[in-house]
Image (spheres, rainbow, N blue to C red):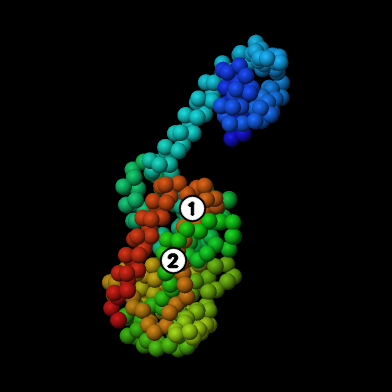
Amino acid sequence: MKALQDLDIVLLTARLGSLSAAARQLDLTPAATSAALKRVEAELGVALFIRSTRSLKLTDEGERFLSHCAEALALIKSGAEAARSNQSQFAGPLRLSLPSDLGRRTLLPWLDHFVAEHPQLSLQLQFSDRLSDLYQTSSDLSLRYGEPEDSSLVALPVAPHNRRVLVASPEYVRRCGQPESPLQLTGHNCLSFQLDAYRHDRWLFSRAGESVTVKVSGNRSADDGEAVHRWALAGQGIAYKSRLDVADDLAEGRLIVLCRDWQGEAAPLNLICADRRQLSPRIQSLRQFLSERCERQLARSECDAA
């Protein structure tokens, strides 16, 4: 902070009685220390020193100002140390925006566990499938699938290898059969996610260098990922979900993966913030904590029953 540096220079000059001595101790040029003194005097509108060719002497105004200034600077520096200590001790609020499905079903209990390990933290959560404007909302951080469209945002990988999978309940498969290829999805009831006027009904798949996009249709769509998930569990149709969203259901057999020879599109999970300076030790620890659990969750889901 420039103003605080200027005040430090003024205090040291008063103690040493010389601008040049203060400059040497601070490894600054005499011109820089003189300019700092002039800035402070201009801001106050008073002269702090009586200057001669050989010495500096504090004015009455300078004496009064510096008696308060030293105490104020000490308080500010103490506050700065407290702020840095607060970061390293994992204290304070975690203000997070989470996707609705993954947030409620998976991330919520994980975050409860993280706070239990660091009881000085507090949680402030927002659940939404809309990408939060981190400059406008109360959330400091956002967990979202995919890279942010705003290149000024900072995205830290949490589950970089996560992908979408085609899933349905065993009951739906018994009733309606199982597609062997994504091209056969046109004969099935597909459950789609819709945000405002845009319906995510073009599903992308790849296999051995081949890519195919299928336009699907069905009798249900929602702007909430959890609703689509619930419909799939209830046997209402086929869903195209992030593997992280359905990992527990795959492991427990409540949902099964369809068209296993085909790979769904990438859906990397990232922790997003507006400024790299927000990446305090507690945020880095949170990212590592979530990343380790996502890795275990994905590995568990790979063991789902065929």
Residue indicated by mark 2: 160
Name the residue rendered at 36%, 73% in the picture: 233
Classify 10 Å Cα crowding around label 2: few (below 14), some (14-19), many (20 and above).
Answer: some
Q: Position of residue 133 (x, y in %)?
A: 56, 55
Which sits in the foreground, 280 or 144? 280
Q: Amino acid at mark 1?
A: Leu
**Of discs 2 and 1, which sits in the foreground?**
2
Name above or below for residue 33 compared with residue 289. Answer: above
Residue lying at 43% horizontally and 88% vertically, measured from the top left: 181
Is 204 in front, or is 89? 89
Q: CA distance from mark 2 to mark 1?
A: 17 Å
Q: Which mark is residue 231?
A: none
Q: Is 22 situated left or right of 256 in this image?
A: right
The residue tagged 1 is 141
Front residue of 104 and 117: 117
Residue 88 placement (x, y as % from top left): 40, 42
User: For the C terminus, which image quadrant?
Assistant: bottom left
- Give percent across and percent down for residue 279: 47, 49
Residue lying furthest top in this view? Answer: 60
Query: Which amino acid type corresponds to the residue marked 2 in the rendered image?
Result: Pro
As drawn, 250 above or below 132: below
